[in-house]
Image (cartoon, rainbow, N blue to C red):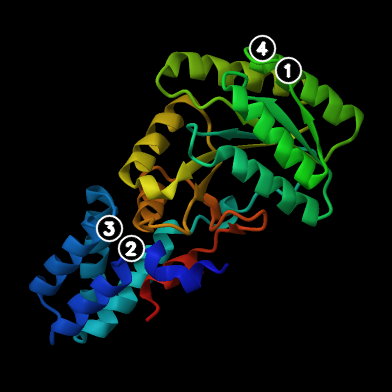
Amino acid sequence: MSLFKEKKSFFGRLSEKISDVIMARGEVDEELMDELEEVLITSDIGMDTTVKIMDKLRDFVKEEYVTKPENVKKGLQKIMTLMVDKGKAQKLCPETPLVILMIGINGGGKTTTIGKLAYKCRQQGKTVMLAAADTFRAAAAEQLVIWGERNGVNVIRHQEGADPSAVIYDAVQSAKAKQIDVLICDTAGRLQNKKNLMNELEKMNKVISREYPEAHRETLLVLDATTGKNAVSQAQEFSQVADITGIVLTKLDGTAKGGIAITIAEEYDLPIKFIGIGEGIEDLEEFDPARFIGGIFDE
């Protein structure tokens, strides 16, 4: 499935709303700006981010002597693309060995994303291993094992309730011994007890740093795009407990509002590395800012 064929459901009605506002006005005036501002705010683009976009748009209109409403649209597209474009930081580290910690709340698509990411790495000719370090949820390890079988990769797991860092330790030793290129680690997403979560992630990171100092590192936060502003607050909460290197935005095949991508990229300066656009094992795309924002503005 191509994300951009599904743009209507993906962006809600953002594309239509922007077009409606611009088509309805014959000139570029403050009323047009106010209406565009309202459209952005109702599309899950946060207030602070919307204010920044509109300030830049007003500057663009003045500097470029814009008199046609359709050219305002082009300026808006350019501004939003620059906001989500984080350059090289958007790419997953290509160096190996690589250890990826996957974080995020339960139900956000974390385990499914791990399966899809494992598939992507395997398609690139890399060897992959999975670590089931979410030992608090009974089904978590089982789900990971299913994804492991689908990808033909080993899964390191302990019994339910085990110390997550012990799972990471065993996985690191196994990955080193087998010279695995990419080790992807599932973690428990319990935001309700931030102190415990912080301690847990710190402990896991210490084990990796101590036992595998030569490994490259990524910490990816998985967010469900359909939850809108909740996803934005999760980005804030997890930023406080982990050194996030990138975002995976899932469930963009549903009724998601694409606006949250802009808010997260701008307000928390976090690069979006992947987007989940379906249930299939291949439905994880590398994030492309120009195509993503272009999806809002394509007629």
- Whether residue 253 is situated above or below residue 121 in the rendered picture: below
Tell me if label 1 and label 4 are in contact, CB under 8 Å: yes
Tell me if label 2 and label 4 are in contact, CB under 8 Å: no
Helix, strand or loop at label 3? It is loop
Residue type at the position of mark 1: His
Residue position marked by numbered label 4 in the rendering? 162
Q: Which of the pair 143/3 is nearer the observer?
A: 143
Tell me if label 3 and label 2 are in contact, CB under 8 Å: yes
Instruction: Tell which circle, 4 or 3, labels the residue nearer the N-terminal end.
Output: 3
The residues tagged by marks 1 and 2 sit, at their Cα atoms, a distance apart of 42 Å
Q: Which residue: 20% across, 69% down?
A: 58
Residue position marked by numbered label 2 in the rendering? 12
The residues tagged by marks 2 and 4 sit, at their Cα atoms, a distance apart of 42 Å
- Whether residue 186 is situated above or below residue 266 in the rendered picture: above
Residue position marked by numbered label 3 in the rendering? 43
- Whether residue 117 is situated above or below residue 53 in the rendered picture: above
Residue type at the position of mark 2: Gly
Q: Which residue: 43% across, 46% down?
A: 269
Residue type at the position of mark 3: Ser
Instruction: Tell which circle, 1 or 2, labels the residue nearer the N-terminal end.
Output: 2
Q: Which residue: 72% across, 45% down?
A: 118
Foreground disc of the pair 3, 2:
2
Q: Position of residue 144 (x, y in %)?
A: 68, 34
